[in-house]
Image (cartoon, rainbow, N blue to C red):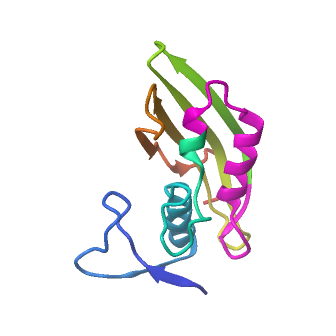
């Protein structure tokens, strides 16, 4: 079974007393890492990451195209630990002419054998006049009601 070093989701740092993660915790940690990486940010491979800056510059974002990119990144490749995403939705919310928000929601179903499912909400805040989203964060990530956990 694959394992990796635990990274604190609040700070992005290794904790003082290191430990390993596997299974559901590993899949969730890798998901946070994939969705929290901006395109071109990682020096070792500048083709990795999501194009948040490009999306921020678009006054009328192409939600189906953005959703497809995001969904591909969420599911990841073989071994990501994620089987599928149900109830996936992308919304664009213009607010007060100053900023806008892209909101992604859905239910992540993990690979058979783990039988865990979580619901997620990720948002990007796009500030007018700034080509870089001001923030990317995950809201509540928890078990889906009625799911096998």
Q: Is residue 12 above or below residue 60?
A: below
Judging depth in this view, the residue of 70 and 75 nearest the camera is 70
Q: Is residue 79 above or below residue 82?
A: below
In the orientation shown, which residue stands out farthest toward the bottom? 1
Judging depth in this view, the residue of 106 and 115 nearest the camera is 106
**Who's the residue at 27% across and 74% down the image?**
15
Residue 115: x %, y % from top left: 67, 65
Judging depth in this view, the residue of 80 and 96 nearest the camera is 96
Q: Quadrant of the N terminus?
A: bottom right
- Give the residues drawn in magenta, as a range: 55-84
Q: Is residue 57 left or right of residue 126?
A: right
* Residue 147 visible in the current orientation: no
**Who's the residue at 61% across and 47% down the image?**
144
Magenta stretch: includes residue 51:
no
Residue 87: x %, y % from top left: 73, 40
**Who's the residue at 36% across and 82% down the image?**
19
Q: How many numbered callouts?
A: 0
* Residue 2 visible in the current orientation: yes
In the orientation shown, which residue stands out farthest toward the top? 96
Q: Is residue 121 left or right of residue 115?
A: left
Residue 94: x %, y % from top left: 55, 19
Q: Is residue 95 left or right of residue 84?
A: left
Q: Quadrant of the C terminus?
A: bottom right
**Who's the residue at 62% across and 40% down the image?**
105
Magenta stretch: includes residue 62:
yes
Q: Is residue 23 above or below residue 68?
A: below
Residue 25: x %, y % from top left: 50, 69
């Amino acid at each position: 079974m694959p394992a990796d070093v635990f990274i604190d989701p609040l700070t992005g740092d290794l904790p003082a007393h290191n430990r390993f993660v596997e299974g559901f915790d590993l899949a969730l940690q890798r998901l946070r890492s994939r969705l929290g990486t901006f395109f071109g940010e990682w020096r070792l491979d500048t083709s990795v990451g999501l194009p948040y800056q490009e999306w921020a510059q678009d006054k009328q974002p192409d939600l189906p195209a953005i959703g497809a990119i995001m969904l591909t990144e969420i599911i990841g490749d073989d071994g990501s630990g994620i089987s599928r995403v149900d109830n996936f939705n992308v919304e664009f919310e213009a607010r007060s002419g100053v900023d806008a928000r892209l909101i992604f929601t859905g239910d992540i179903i993990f690979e058979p054998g783990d039988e865990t499912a979580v619901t997620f909400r990720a948002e990007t805040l796009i500030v007018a006049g700034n080509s870089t989203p001001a923030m990317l964060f995950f809201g509540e990530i928890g078990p889906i009601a009625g799911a096998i956990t």
